[in-house]
Image (spheres, grey):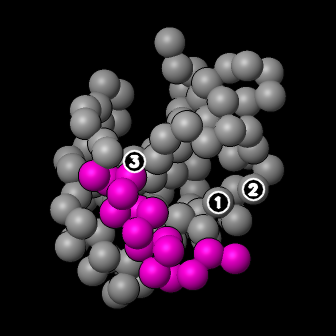
């Protein structure tokens, strides 16, 4: 099980590695400090919680995760290589864990 500090380091690292957004859901980059504050306050679910809630849907090799804000909504974007060889992007509400869009990566 992932500890809270390991999770924070993982999220901060992933946010730091995010360079650009090409999706129609492209959101604003969130600073490391703000991401930590949102998690600490309970405003957003942890990455571990999001994955646990969507364990069956998010199966495959995790290629990338982005944490963004779009029109006041916090979003996790997962890029996953499925067992069928197709790369899909899953867009999830970071407060509820609900998947609201799935697209196939070109």
Q: Secondary structure at mark 1?
A: helix
Give how far across and how far down residue 32 sits, in percent: 24, 66
Q: Mark 2 highlights which residue? A: 55
Q: Is residue 73 visible?
A: yes
Residue contact between numbered discs 2 and 1, judged by CB atoms under 8 Å = yes
In this picture, residue 9 sits left or right of residue 88: left
Q: Mark 3 highlights which residue? A: 66
Q: Secondary structure at mark 2?
A: loop
Question: Which one is earlier in the sequence, the residue at label 1 or at label 3?
Answer: 1
Which residue is painted at 47% across and 57% down in the image?
93
* The one of 73 and 45 positioned closer to us in this rendering: 45
Residue 43 circle label: none
Give how far across and how far down residue 9 sits, in percent: 40, 69
Residue 51 circle label: 1
The residues tagged by marks 2 and 1 sit, at their Cα atoms, a distance apart of 5 Å
In this picture, residue 79 sits left or right of residue 19: right
Q: Secondary structure at mark 3?
A: strand
Which residue is painted at 75% across and 56% down in the image?
55
Q: Is residue 45 visible?
A: no
* The one of 61 and 46 positioned closer to us in this rendering: 61
Range covered by the magenta-colored residues: 1-16
Neighbours of disc 1 within 10 Å: few (<14), some (14-19), many (20+): some
Image quadrant assignment for residue 73? bottom left
Which residue is painted at 32% across and 53% down in the image?
15
């Amino acid at each position: 099980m992932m500890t809270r500090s390991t999770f924070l380091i993982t999220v901060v690292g992933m946010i730091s590695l995010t360079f650009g957004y090409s999706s129609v859901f492209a959101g604003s980059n969130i600073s490391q400090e703000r991401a930590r504050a949102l998690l600490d306050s309970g405003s957003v679910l942890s990455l571990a919680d999001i994955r646990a809630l969507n364990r069956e849907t998010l199966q495959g090799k995790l290629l990338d995760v982005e944490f963004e804000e779009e029109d006041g909504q916090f979003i996790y974007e997962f890029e996953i290589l499925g067992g069928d060889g197709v790369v899909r992007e899953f867009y999830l509400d970071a407060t509820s864990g609900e998947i609201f869009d799935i697209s196939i990566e070109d």
